[in-house]
């Protein structure tokens, strides 16, 4: 018997943003116009805006490039421990753009349930005036930190209260941000996390420039906190809030180091053909722009479909590679074991049986689900062996089970026989490449009796 397994694509989409119209979103992020491209296939650089916020490049904002950078991280299942103080096995799993959270630019989901709320600024400085971006960022962070979910959203993992143990408030800043933000502020919040019990908060600043920056930051926090909570923050409140902030530079615009890192990661961990890295990056940038415009998002599988739609072959996800390789090894062993059913060994020579039914069976398999029936010895196993070999030779994905050499009586037993750590159907759902899997079961009746 042969079955075809089709992958299901899905994407995460946050609730609609009742407070923001489509026009405002488009104004902030640029509309999804066709990107102008240079000779290397990358977007052409346009004149940058003189101040912080969006630095549009061929219709794409800095925020769009940051989102694409994290899309690569999700596809590669890169460890999130180095930047976000998570344990080494934690990876980023999903991304949402232009959400309805107080901190609304980008929301990243982690495999342990943690959330990273990003404000993306291409050029942020430490000023506190009306035209500075820092007061707005701090205000959004405070409101996110204090936000209480509505009664009907209490069980929604994306809407729960901010948890400093696993959630992060991230200033994602571009290379044109001031030294006070890129270096001083980053070091200050790091020192706050490392302070001893009872140590004054202001000790986190070590020179006059840092003292001024920390004092300005605390005034902004206190102002937003009072406006949101109708009370002044306590010292423990301030300490816990500052410990939740991460300041990280992402130089991800065209020809910058972050773009180069993303392209390198695509080549080494994601793509089958590293020559398609530029095309993959452009596809992900456009997906980020689309997600921002539509206020939607994607998980790893949905991002894989973006590349599949662009006809860019990818490797198996890191977390599924061992299981896929185990299934492939099992299948090769099974096909090899069935080879004797497709030939006759006379003792002096091997005679290959060329059955007319083979071509018919191959066409039927490609067309859809197929059940092969016949009397014992009619050549069913030999024909299925030949059909499977043809598909493997054509680069198709094949899984083959021969019931008369299998001891599995349950799906769990089958997983153990394959020597895989995840359920078989889950592994098939995360198998890269063509959406069709060719699943052979020889001696199906025997397998039914066992189960």
Image (cartoon, rainbow, N blue to C red):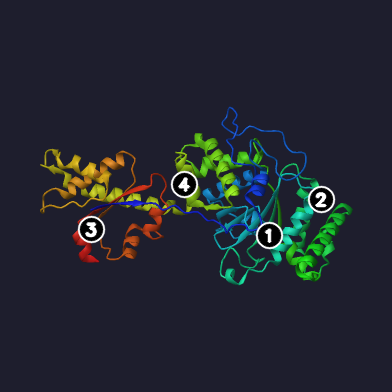
For the residues bearing labels 4 and 1, Cβ distance under 8 angstroms: no
Image location of residue 234, percent across then percent down: 80, 71
Asked if the residues shown at circle 2 and circle 3 are in contact, with their CB atoms under 8 angstroms apart, the answer is no
- Measure the alpha-carbon separation of dots 2 and 4: 41 Å
Residue topped by disc 4: 305
- Reading the chain from its start, which is encountered first: label 2 or label 3? 2
Residue labelled with disc 3: 403
Disc 3 versus disc 1: nearer the observer: 1
| Label 3 with label 1: CB-CB less than 8 Å | no
Q: Residue at the spot x=76%, y=57% of the render?
A: 138
Residue 67 higher or lower than 241, as above or below? above
The quadrant of the rendering that contains the C terminus is bottom left
> Mark 1 to mark 2: distance in Å?
21 Å
Indicate the secondary structure of the residue bearing disc 4. helix
Residue at x-position 27% and y-position 44% = 366
Mark 1 — residue?
Answer: 102
Q: CA distance from mark 4 to mark 1?
A: 30 Å
Point out the frontmost of discs 2 and 3: 2
Pinpoint residue 364: horizontal percent, then vertical percent. Answer: 23, 45
Which of the two discs, 4 and 1, sits closer to the camera? 1
Mark yes or no: residue 386 visible. no
C-alpha distance separating marks 3 and 1: 56 Å
Q: Is residue 49 above or below residue 76?
A: above
Residue indicated by mark 2: 126
Visible in this render: residue 342? yes
Mark 3–mark 4 Cα distance, whole angstroms, equals 34 Å
In screen coordinates, is 84 left or right of 201?
Answer: left
Q: Position of residue 128 (x, y in %)?
A: 83, 53
**Under tag 1, what secondary structure?**
loop
Up-down: is 94 above or below 155?
above
The residue nearer to you, when weighing 121 against 209, is: 121
């Amino acid at each position: 018997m042969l079955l075809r397994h089709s992958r299901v694509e899905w994407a995460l989409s946050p609730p609609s943003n009742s407070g923001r119209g489509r026009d405002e979103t488009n104004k902030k992020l640029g509309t999804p116009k066709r990107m102008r491209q240079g000779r290397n296939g990358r977007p052409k650089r346009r004149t940058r805006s003189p101040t912080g916020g969006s630095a549009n490049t061929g219709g794409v904002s800095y925020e769009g490039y940051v989102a694409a950078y994290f899309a690569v991280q999700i596809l590669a299942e890169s460890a999130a421990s180095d930047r976000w103080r998570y344990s080494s096995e934690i990876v980023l799993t999903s991304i949402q753009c232009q959400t309805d959270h107080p901190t609304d630019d980008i929301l990243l989901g982690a495999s342990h349930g943690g959330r990273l709320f990003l404000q993306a600024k291409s050029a942020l400085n430490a000023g506190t005036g009306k035209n500075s971006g820092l007061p707005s960022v701090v205000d959004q962070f405070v409101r996110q930190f204090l936000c209480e979910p509505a009664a009907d959203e209490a069980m929604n993992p994306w809407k729960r209260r901010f948890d400093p143990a696993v959630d992060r408030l991230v200033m994602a800043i571009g290379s044109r941000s001031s030294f006070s933000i890129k270096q001083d502020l980053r070091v200050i919040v790091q020192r706050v996390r490392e302070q001893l019990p009872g140590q004054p908060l202001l000790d986190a600043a070590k020179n006059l420039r840092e003292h001024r920056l920390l004092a300005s930051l605390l005034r902004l926090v206190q102002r937003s906190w009072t406006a949101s909570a109708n009370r002044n923050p306590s010292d423990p409140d301030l300490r816990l809030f500052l410990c939740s902030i991460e300041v990280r530079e992402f130089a991800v615009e065209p020809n910058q180091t972050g773009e180069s890192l993303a392209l390198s990661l695509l080549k080494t961990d994601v793509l089958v053909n590293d020559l398609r890295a530029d095309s993959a990056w452009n596809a992900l940038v456009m997906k980020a722009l689309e997600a921002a415009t539509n206020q939607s998002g994607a998980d790893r599988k949905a991002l894989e479909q973006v590349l599949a739609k662009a006809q860019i072959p990818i490797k198996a996800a890191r977390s599924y590679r061992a299981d896929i390789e185990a299934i492939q090894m099992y299948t090769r062993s099974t096909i090899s074991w069935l080879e004797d059913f497709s030939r006759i060994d006379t003792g002096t020579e091997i005679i290959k049986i060329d059955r007319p039914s083979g071509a018919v069976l191959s066409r039927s398999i490609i067309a859809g689900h197929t059940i092969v029936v016949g009397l014992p010895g009619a050549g069913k196993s030999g024909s299925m062996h030949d059909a499977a070999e043809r598909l493997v030779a054509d680069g198709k994905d094949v899984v083959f089970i021969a019931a008369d050499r299998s001891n599995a009586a349950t799906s769990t037993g089958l997983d153990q026989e394959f020597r895989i750590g995840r359920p078989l159907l889950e592994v098939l759902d995360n198998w890269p490449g063509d959406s069709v899997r060719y699943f052979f079961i020889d001696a199906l009746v025997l397998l039914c009796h066992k189960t």
